[in-house]
Each structure stands twice: as C-alpha cells, then as structure tokens.
Image (cartoon, rainbow, N blue to C red):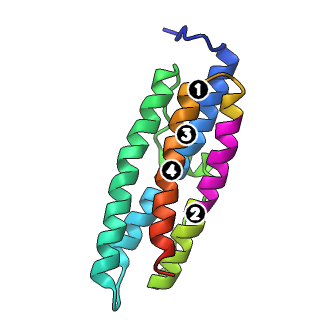
Amino acid sequence: MEPKIGITKKELESSINCLTTVLANDMLLYTKTRKFHWNVSGNSFMELHKLFETQYTALEQEIDEVAERISKLGGKAIGTMQEFIDHSILKENPKAVDQKEMLKELLSDHEAVLKQLRDFTKEVEETDDYGTADFLTGLLQKHEDKSWMLRQYI
C-alpha cells in the first residue's frame, strides 16, 4: 500500500533514491571497516581492532535504520553486494594495507559520505520530506563522529 503522508509519489521516489545510495555507502563502509578490523596488525593492534569494531557495529545499526526508512516511504531496500556496489559512491579495497592506510581510507570514505549526505539533506528538504531530512541529518552527525575519531589517529 502506498503511503499517503503528504508527499507526492515522485518526491517519495526521490527520497528513496537518496536513501538507497546512503544504504549502499554504509554497507560498503561497514564491509571495509569489518575487513580492516579482521586484518589490522602492528603496534596499535588492540586499540584499532576495538575502534573498528565499535564503528562497524554502529554502522550495522544505521544500515538497518536506513533500510527501514526506505520501507516506511513505500520502497524496497536493495540487498545484494552487487546492488550495493552499483549504488555506492565508494569503492572496495581488495588490497592489504597498513594501519595508517586503513585509517586514511576510512576517513576519506566517511568524508565523501558526509558531503553527499549534506547534498541529499538539501535535496530532500525541497520535497517537504522533513522526516527523511531529519533522519539524514542524524546520520550525518554519526559520520562526523566516526570521522573525528579516525582523524585523531592520523
């Protein structure tokens, strides 16, 4: 059943498209953060191992919330790795990298997501979908926190 919440079908589709990209970005970040958690080594092993675990655990919760927001707006969340890759602005990293490169790459990815979230928030606000705009603002703040934590190690 189509939601009748004062937002046109076209505007709902626009919000769903933005959220689909957000979902894809967060899934790639989650997967990369988990990979780095598994493969980190060196002097700061335990500290970074725990940091990465904290961040991927938070991303896991956020991913679920994004998928549920898509559903609330009448959409269907994507769910295959290929769909996530196709819809994301981020890229996978198949190489083994050292601690510093892990931190730099995760920071760069979060910063790219932040820039896109700001654009999406403005776009969604123009459709009067204030619920999604507020939701995106909350996600933006969470990515700012993760970025700040990563930046402290570089």
Q: Which residue is mark 2?
A: 109
Q: Which residue is mark 1?
A: 130
Q: Nearer the viewer, residue 52 or 86?
A: 52
In x, y percent, where is residue 17? 63, 33
Q: Which residue is mark 4?
A: 141
Q: Assess disc 4: are there few (<14), some (14-19) or many (≥20) residues with their C-alpha within 10 Å of its C-alpha.
A: few
Q: Secondary structure at mark 3?
A: helix
Is residue 12 placed above or below 82 in the rendered structure? above
In x, y percent, where is residue 132? 55, 30
Q: Distance from label 2 to label 3 (Cα)? A: 17 Å
Q: Tag 3 or tag 1, which sits nearer the N-term?
A: 1
Q: Amino acid at mark 4?
A: Gln
Residue occupying the point 34% across, 70% down? 51
Q: Which residue is mark 3?
A: 136
- The magenta stretch spans residue 113: yes
Looking at the rendered image, the disc whose residue lies closer to the viewer, 2 or 1, is 1
Q: Distance from label 2 to label 4 (Cα)? A: 15 Å
